[in-house]
Amino acid sequence: MKKLLFILGISLAIYACSNSSDDEIKPVNGNAEYEAAETYFNNTLKPIVDAKCVSCHTGYHSKSNSSNYGTLSNAINRASGMYNQVNAGNMPKGGDKLPQEDIDKFKAFLDLVNKIP
Ligand code: HEC
């Protein structure tokens, strides 16, 4: 019985890992503008979001995880909301306003997202 439970546990672990596709969202459009936004997000914006936003925005006040902005699709959907919030100094909630160079990165990402057809 113990052996069976062990095998079941391993199987579940493997299944869970093979399904964690959040980080590897493929371009929905496959166009150059989308890829430019994706590259900018991965290389420049995501490190800021991961460090300053994700702790609260991962399934915390949003059960659906739609506000986990460390995920490209969510970040694209809410690019303007994110920029407005950091530019207004509302986010990170309860923390210091981000330095202007970081706010500029949210703006640059928004501009790239707006170019996606
Ligand atoms: C300390 C926790 C915390 C941190 C850190 C944080 N947020 Fe939030 N955020 C919240 C809460 C809670 C709300 C819900 C509205 C409210 O209470 O103001 C929210 C709301 C928002 C909203 C409005 C829409 C939504 O998703 O609910 C945006 C956009 C947003 N945050 C972006 C950000 C960004 C970008 C960062 C990082 C720069 C960030 N937040 C960091 C807690 C946080």
Image: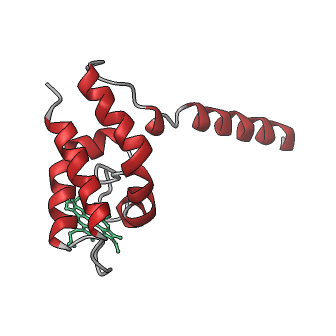
The residue under the point 19% across, 46% down is 110
In-front residue for pair 64/44: 44
Residue occupying the far top of the picture? 30
In the rendered view, tell whether residue 11 sits above or below residue 57: above
Question: Left of 62 or right of it: where is 15?
Answer: right
- Residue 17: x and y in percent read 60, 37
For image coordinates 48% across by 34% down, the residue present is 21
Residue 62, x across and y down, in percent: 29, 58
Q: Residue at x 30, y 38 (%)?
A: 73
Q: Is residue 22 left or right of residue 113?
A: right
Q: Residue at x 84, y 41 (%)?
A: 1
**Position of residue 106 measured from the top left corner of the image (x, y, whole percent):** 25, 54
As drawn, 102 above or below 5: below
Ligand 1, seen in the image, is in the quarter at bottom left
Residue at the front extreme of this rendering = 101
Is the C terminus in the top left, top right, bottom left or bottom right quadrant? top left
Q: Is residue 4 left or right of residue 103?
A: right
Q: Looking at this view, is 5 or 111 the one in front?
A: 111
Residue 78 visible, this angle: no
Residue 10: quarter of image: top right
